[in-house]
Amino acid sequence: MAQLYFEDVGEGTRLPTLVKTPTTRQLVMFACATYDYYELHYDRQFARDSGVHDVIVHGPLKNSFLAQLVTDWMGEAGTLKRLSVQYRGMDTPGSPVYAEGTVTRKYVRGGENLVECELRLVNARRETTTPGSALVALPSRREP
């Protein structure tokens, strides 16, 4: 994507939606990469015995989808200063999730051009399963 500049955004600007469809293979690969081998993420019978209808997507993987949304949007010269999420619902493999965001505030502080965003990961039923927020520093077109 092209570089995003501070002057390009305003309150209410929507980030482009990022669509992900996690697979059980991706969950196994993520488990290996993060040493998170909790059976709820790969063993369907364990999940059912635990009261869940299917295995569920790792919370930190959902966090990474929101991080990708923001870092793809801000461009290489942007800096992700803060990312915060909450896990409020379960997502299952094979079902698409949509990473979305909206600019809620922009301001200059300490010489940095800062943009705050409200984020959310929603399922196909439009339920927010992972709300969050981000703080991004963007370059200015006015800076040399």
Image (spheres, rainbow, N blue to C red):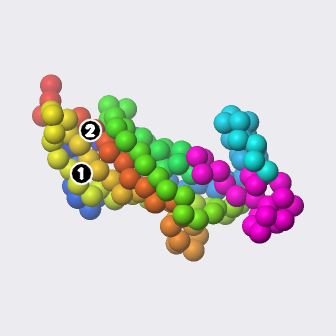
Q: Which residues are magenta?
A: 40-61
Magenta-drawn stretch contains 33: no
Q: Nearer the viewer, residue 83 or 123?
A: 83
Residue 134, compared with residue 44, is above or below; it is: above
Q: How many marks?
A: 2
Q: Residue pushed farthest front?
A: 50
Q: Residues within 10 Å of mark 2 (few under 14, many from 20)?
A: many
Q: Which of the two labelled residues, at mark 1 and mark 2, occupies the earlier sequence position?
A: 1
**Where is residue 86 shown, x and y percent of the image?**
49, 56
Residue under the image location 58 percent in, 65 percent down: 89
Q: Is residue 43 magenta?
A: yes
Q: Which residue is mark 2?
A: 138
Q: Are marks 1 and 2 in contact (CB under 8 Å)?
A: yes
Query: What is the number of the mark on residue 9?
Result: 1
Asked whether the viewer can see residue 98, the reply is no
Q: Nearer the viewer, residue 130 or 4?
A: 130
Residue 76 in view:
yes
Residue at position x 23%, y 54% from top?
A: 105
